[in-house]
Amino acid sequence: MKRRGRSQIRLNKNIIDNFNDETYIKLKSIVEKIGGRNNDDKIKNIFDEACEKWALKHDEVIKLNNKNDDLIKECEDLKDDKKALKNKVKELEKRMNALIEESEAQKNGPDDEVNKENFQCLKEGYEELQNEKDAMANKIRGLERRIKHLVEESDEQANSTNKELDERNIIIKNMEKQLKELKMRESENYEEFTKLEQERNKLQNHIVKLEKTLEIHKQEHIENYEYIKTLEQERKGLNFTISTLEKTIQRFENLGYKLMEKGISHH
């Protein structure tokens, strides 16, 4: 069972690989392009599954057509055989009639013994011809039955073939419709994808600009921090200078007070 199953699978694969229907080849090319652009095998898998049935049905139709042609040829051959047998029967009938006439003529002749002997021979010949005629008639009737059966079988095969062809055409039309819809959707999706791609590129460019701006601000912040740091150091330096000056002034003031006190004391 398993071996037969594998053999059937190989046979089906061979049928599909050699399926060269023009519509199938055209549709297959379209589907492969759609799948390739979208990087999606789903459409191709659906198409392959449908076309596998299509190819097998197509092969069945070819076999049915060949069988139908064989039946028609066999039917024509039987008709020729029937015609030949009818002609042979006619010849036999002529011979039988000739024997009957000869028998009647001899029966009325003068020599009864000879006539009896000849009549017996003629009778046997007549019976032999009659048997041959009956056998041929039976053969003709058999041929007629066979012809009738072949015609019916041929008509049945033709109807079956036409039905298969109608189903095949329906499958093709449905597939063409589906592919047209897929193509439209794919076109719409492609346009949408293009828009999204453009939008993404814009966002990426905007992000790059923001990163540059951020870097500038960061650099400015660092520079400002360094500047603030410098100012802070300068402020500290100034505070120190001011403090030093204040101390110096304080010393001078103290010194001035002392001098003044000395002058007052001398007076």
Image: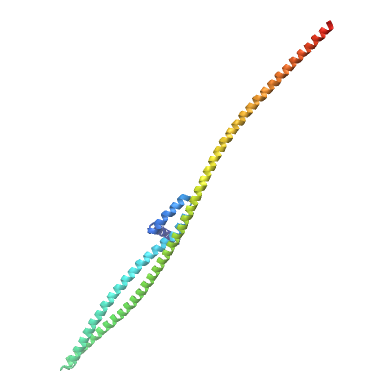
Label count reads: 0
Question: Is 9 displayed left or right of 120 in the figure?
Answer: right
Colour treatment of the image: rainbow
Which image quarter: residue 71? bottom left
For image coordinates 28% across by 83% down, the residue present is: 134
Q: Quadrant of the N terminus?
A: bottom left
| 7 over 234 or under it: above or below | below
For image coordinates 79% across by 9% down, the residue present is: 259
Q: Is residue 19 visible?
A: no
Q: Position of residue 194 (x, y in %)?
A: 49, 48
Question: Is 248 displayed left or right of 60 in the figure?
Answer: right
Q: Say which of 7 and 143 sits in front.
A: 143
Q: Say which of 18 and 95 sits in front.
A: 18
Q: Position of residue 129 (x, y in %)?
A: 24, 83
For image coordinates 39% across by 68% down, the residue present is: 162
For image coordinates 60% across by 33% down, the residue present is: 217
| 198 over 260 or under it: above or below | below
Q: Is residue 57 visible?
A: yes
Q: Residue furthest top?
A: 266
Q: Residue furthest front?
A: 267
Q: Say which of 203 and 110 sits in front.
A: 203
Q: Say which of 19 and 92 sits in front.
A: 19
| 44 over 210 or under it: above or below | below
Q: Position of residue 180 (x, y in %)?
A: 45, 57
Q: Quadrant of the C terminus?
A: top right
| 50 over 191 or under it: above or below | below
Q: Position of residue 149 (x, y in %)?
A: 36, 75
Which image quarter: residue 15? bottom left
